[in-house]
Amino acid sequence: MNRYRKTVVCMIVLGMMMIPFGHTTSAEETALEGGIQTVHLNLKTKPSFSPETEATTEAIEEKPPKSYTSEFADLGRTREWKTIGTWEADGVQYDTTYEGGIKFNMWWVQDPNEDDYTADVQYRWTLMLDGQEIGYYEDEEQHNCEQAKGNPCEWTGSTGFNSTEPFVAGQVLSVKIEYWAFADIYIYYDNATFDSGVSFDADAVYFGAGAYNSNDVSFDVVEAWSTNLNKAVDGYFVYMIVNSMTQANDQVSVSSGAEYDVGTSNVGSQKITWPIGVNSAPSVTFSYAANESDSASMMITLKAGTSGGGSLDGDEEGGIPGFGISLVVGAVVVVSLFRRRL
């Protein structure tokens, strides 16, 4: 009889321990935060095209192919359209909705050695999805910038989308840039200051599992176009304020986060973690670039709990990892009652 009672006790205890912890939230159950925000895709080392922004390196300085032809010992010049280049993004990770118009921008300056002519530059930009045009802009005005190299002017142009259909997971966005001018020019890109590229409004980033406790602060980032988020951390485009003080990013880590269902796609995330314990929700801001850029700054919602779980029960100290303290205590009480009868 005693052996039977002991078996029952063990079964009850094990059964109670198998009950899931009441406040644990899986990635699939964790609601993602996000929505339509302005995203700026930067021209990067050819042929890359990405929201990722360089904060600690110098801009790329490039001299495009000559677009003019000299006549009669350079007494006159004619010009023709020349391709500066085509930049291509990675395939979008989930179906991405966009709205509004498209803005193009280019940092450029006329070659200082060109003293006899002004550039009178004009640009043509073609935005493509899987090689098909979805946006086109051609300059109607001529532009000049006769400043020193390294101190360029910003050119901008805008147009609308040719389509309203969302980008489908796996589709590739690219941009082709052309120009013509009566003088040589230099262009600048792939830098937080000289951020030449394309911007528009889209649901290009979501956030999940934002949490803080006495050990750390963290949240997951789900991106339409995957980036190296260490760039954003190093540039303090992502930062945390505690008690009115911006915290150092020196020890911030970027690691693999949970997977989330976005539309019909299952997408991996990246987790950003500050190894700083707090007792109340800090202010955390995320952006791909500096605040003065076209990239939107977004506030992250954080809940008290374990990192990545969205749990509301604070630190999991003591007890059995993964199980509520109340369940463990309950199991101990049952064992005690049965032991008195054995």
Image: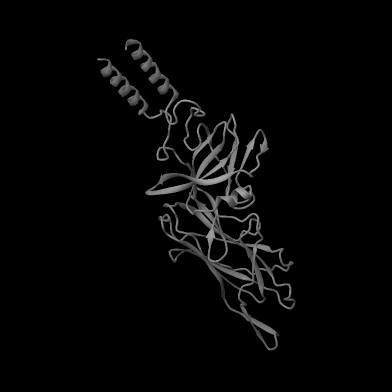
Name the quadrant containing residue 252.
Answer: top right
Q: Position of residue 55 (x, y in %)?
A: 64, 54
Question: What residue is at 66 percent from the left and 57 percent from the top?
Answer: 193
Question: What residue is at 68 percent from the left and 63 percent from the top?
Answer: 153
Foreground of the two, 120 or 292: 292
Foreground of the two, 153 or 2: 2
Question: What residue is at 53 percent from the left and 61 percent from the top?
Answer: 49
Question: What residue is at 26 percent from the left and 18 percent from the top?
Answer: 4
Q: Quadrant of the C terminus?
A: top left
Query: Does residue 278 appear in the picture of this structure?
Result: yes
Determine whether, in the image, residue 80 is placed left or right of residue 328.
Answer: right
Indicate the colouring scheme: one colour
Q: Is residue 111 above or below residue 224?
A: below
Q: Position of residue 197 (x, y in %)?
A: 57, 60
Name the quadrant containing residue 157.
Answer: bottom right
Q: Is residue 212 above or below residue 158?
A: above
So how many labels did they put on this image?
0
Q: Quadrant of the N terminus?
A: top left
Query: Does residue 176 appear in the picture of this structure?
Result: no
Q: Position of residue 56 (x, y in %)?
A: 65, 55
Foreground of the two, 64 or 216: 216
Q: Is residue 290 above or below residue 118?
A: above
Give the residue at the far top of this rendering.
Answer: 341
Q: Position of residue 7 (x, y in %)?
A: 28, 21
